[in-house]
Amino acid sequence: MENNVHTWFEVYSPDTESGKKFYADVFGWSSEDMDMGDFMYPMLKSGDKPFHAGMMSLKSPDMEGVPPHWLIYFHTADIDATLSKIDAAGGKTVHGPMDIPGVGRIAIVHDNGGAHFAVHQPAPMEG
């Protein structure tokens, strides 16, 4: 995959059930809940296209104070090098990096103006 392109979107919602209904009513998106072990992660898609977004619940204690928002993820081949560049350019790592089995490593950061985004280094392909 090409470096520095967006790979995923995530919407942070105080009520994922009403959020899923909203996006179904407005855009016709369907959803499928993915079991993440300690929580369910709704995945959103349009028609028969691949999933293109996920939905995080703001109800957990670690989300206290986080407002509802959309978050964009950018691909990187080397998350550690990318985080170093972000820091050097005046940005900051807010959360992570963290390893997610089968997904890869992600970190939430903000740029030098305070705008949040995430970086994602995919897990190695099996096979």
Image (tube, rainbow, N blue to C red):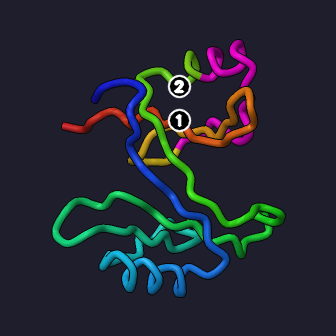
Q: Quadrant of residue 12?
A: bottom right
Q: Mark 2 Cα within 10 Å, few/some/many (few <14, many 20+)?
A: some
Residue 98 belongs to the span the image colors magenta: yes
> Residue 4 in the image: x percent, y percent?
42, 27
User: Which sits in the foreground, 31 or 21?
Assistant: 21
Q: Residue 33 or 87: which is nearer the viewer?
A: 87
Where residue 47 appears, as percent x and y from the top left, is 20, 72
**What quarter of the picture does the N terminus occupy?**
top left
Q: Is residue 64 above or below residue 85?
A: below
Q: In x, y percent, where is residue 44?
A: 37, 69
Nearer-the-camera pick, 99 or 72? 72
User: In the visual, does 107 lie left or right of 110?
Assistant: left
* Residue 18 painted magenta: no
Tell me which residue sits at (83%, 63%) in the image.
65
Query: Residue at 42% of width from left, 33% of height from top?
Result: 75
Image quarter of the C terminus:
top left
Return the x and y of residue 59 as percentages of the image width and height: 71, 75
- Residue drawn at 53 percent across, 35 percent down: 119
The residue under label 1 is 119
Q: CA distance from mark 1 to mark 2?
A: 7 Å
Task: Give the number of the mark in front: 1 or 2.
Answer: 1
Span of residues in magenta: 83-99
- Which amino acid does the dot numbered 2 rest on? Ile
Q: What residue would you read off at disc 2?
A: 79
Up-down relation of residue 64 to residue 10 (above or below): below
Q: Residue at x 54, y 41 (%)?
A: 99
Kind of residue at disc 1: Val
The numbered disc on residue 111 is: none
Element at label 2: helix
Residues at marks 1 and 2 touching, judged by CB atoms closer than 8 Å: yes
Badge 1: residue crowd in 10 Å (few <14, some 14–19, many ≥20): many
